[in-house]
């Protein structure tokens, strides 16, 4: 649980973000902003499994990249409107999440993680060989289309507001899931699965639903990224992407709702500003991650919460007066 001081701080930050969000595309390059928002949603969606259900998945790139290909195909080859193409990508990812989740939850721990990795690699090779994906060249160029048939999204600023609305809705849904009775059951399964079974909960069903929700929201992030960059590539569906989202989640703090979003923003900033280093950027990010793990073992947000919770509470004036009288 967050300390009251951290809750107040997060509320202030959230309100400030809501106030300045409409002005951000006029101050910072909109494409970079949208990229950070997509990865923030991806990390928070992944954390539904890792942080709240205790399920380690090495296959989330299949949902993120797979939805990008489906959205790109719907926009470029089928001529669908943008909102329908994004919805199709997210729905594809959710269905894929049900399939992979139903197969993976037959095992636990590292065996479950390896199953998700193997199935994700099957998805990777499927898109590598499919005739419409462009193989190593990727699917490009993908038109951004129009929203509701009349709002042209070729402008980065207009697209920014669409991405902002979708990501804000996705993060709200993540928060609602985590702070619902369903989220409480997920945490009960994470802490002691046999006890959750003994209490009558259909544990396997809850895990599959968690997979579907996490995959669908990850797919929404992948679809938005596809529209932003007008590209769906094998990079998005490669297992490296699954490793990146784990890195973002651990760095930001997996025992919180929005901690992974902080990790996603930090990783995006590091890779953007250290891009001039070429291949060495991976080494630099790895060293920074090692340093953060050693210093912030609970993640950045978790460590801040821990430090604030250790501060002595201010004495209540009424209690001080009673003690003085005694």
Image (spheres, helix red, strand yellow):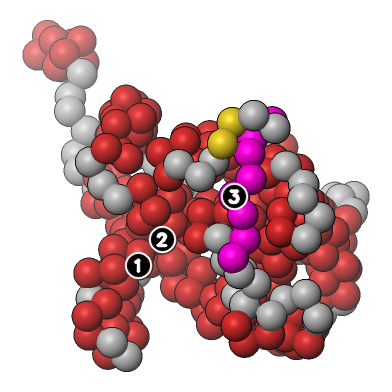
Counting from the top left corner in percent of width and height, residue 111 is at 74, 86
Image position of 185 (left or right of 61): right
Disc 2 packing (10 Å; few <14; some 14–19; many ≥20):
many
Q: Is residue 146 magenta?
A: yes
Residue under the image location 51 percent in, 54 percent down:
228
Helix, strand or loop at mark 2: helix
Q: Is residue 115 magenta?
A: no
Above or below, 303 against 181 in this view is below
Label 3 environment density (alpha carbons within 10 Å; few <14, some 14–19, many ≥20):
many
Q: Main secondary structure of the magenta part?
A: loop
Instruction: Say if residue 253 shows up in the picture.
Output: no
Residue 278: percent from the left, percent from the top? 28, 87
- Say which residue label 2 marks: 264
Q: Residue 313, relative to residue 60: is it above or below?
A: above
Across and down, in percent, residue 204 comes to: 87, 61
| The image quarter in which residue 48 lies | bottom right
Residue occupied by mark 3: 144
- Report, in whole angstroms, how far the alpha carbon at label 1 lies from the one at label 2: 5 Å
Q: Earlier in the sequence, mark 1 or mark 3?
A: 3
Q: Residue at x 77, y 47 (%)?
A: 80
> How far apart in space, not on screen, are marks 2 and 3 (Cα)?
24 Å
Task: Pinpoint residue 36: horizontal percent, then vertical percent.
Answer: 41, 55
Q: Which residues are magenta?
A: 141-148
């Amino acid at each position: 649980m967050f300390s009251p001081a951290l809750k107040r701080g997060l509320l202030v930050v959230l309100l400030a973000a809501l106030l300045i969000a409409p002005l951000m595309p006029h101050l910072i390059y909109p494409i970079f902003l949208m990229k950070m928002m997509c990865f923030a949603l991806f990390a928070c969606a992944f954390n539904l499994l890792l942080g709240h259900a205790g399920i380690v998945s090495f296959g989330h790139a299949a949902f993120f990249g797979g939805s990008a290909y489906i959205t790109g195909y719907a926009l470029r080859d089928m001529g669908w409107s943008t909102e329908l193409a994004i919805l199709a990508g997210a729905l594809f990812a959710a269905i894929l999440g049900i399939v992979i989740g139903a197969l993976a939850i037959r095992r636990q721990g590292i065996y479950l993680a390896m199953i998700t990795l193997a199935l994700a690699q099957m998805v990777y090779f499927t898109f590598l060989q499919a005739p419409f994906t462009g193989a190593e060249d990727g699917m490009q160029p993908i038109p951004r289309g129009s929203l509701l048939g009349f709002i042209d999204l070729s402008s980065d600023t207009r697209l920014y507001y669409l991405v902002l609305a979708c990501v804000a809705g996705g993060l709200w849904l993540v928060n609602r899931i985590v702070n619902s009775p369903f989220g409480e059951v997920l945490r009960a399964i994470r802490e002691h699965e046999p006890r959750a079974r003994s209490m009558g909960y259909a544990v396997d069903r809850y895990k599959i639903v968690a997979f579907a929700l996490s995959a669908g929201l990850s797919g929404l992030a992948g679809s938005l990224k596809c529209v932003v960059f007008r590209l769906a590539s094998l990079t998005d569906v490669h297992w490296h992407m699954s490793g990146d989202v784990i890195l973002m989640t651990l760095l930001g703090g997996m025992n919180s709702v929005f901690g992974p979003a902080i990790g996603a923003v930090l990783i995006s900033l590091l890779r953007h500003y250290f891009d001039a280093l070429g291949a060495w950027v991976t080494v630099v990010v790895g060293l920074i991650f090692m340093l953060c793990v050693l210093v912030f073992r609970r993640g950045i947000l978790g460590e801040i919460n821990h430090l604030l919770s250790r501060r002595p509470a201010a004495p209540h004036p009424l209690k001080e007066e009673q003690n003085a009288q005694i």
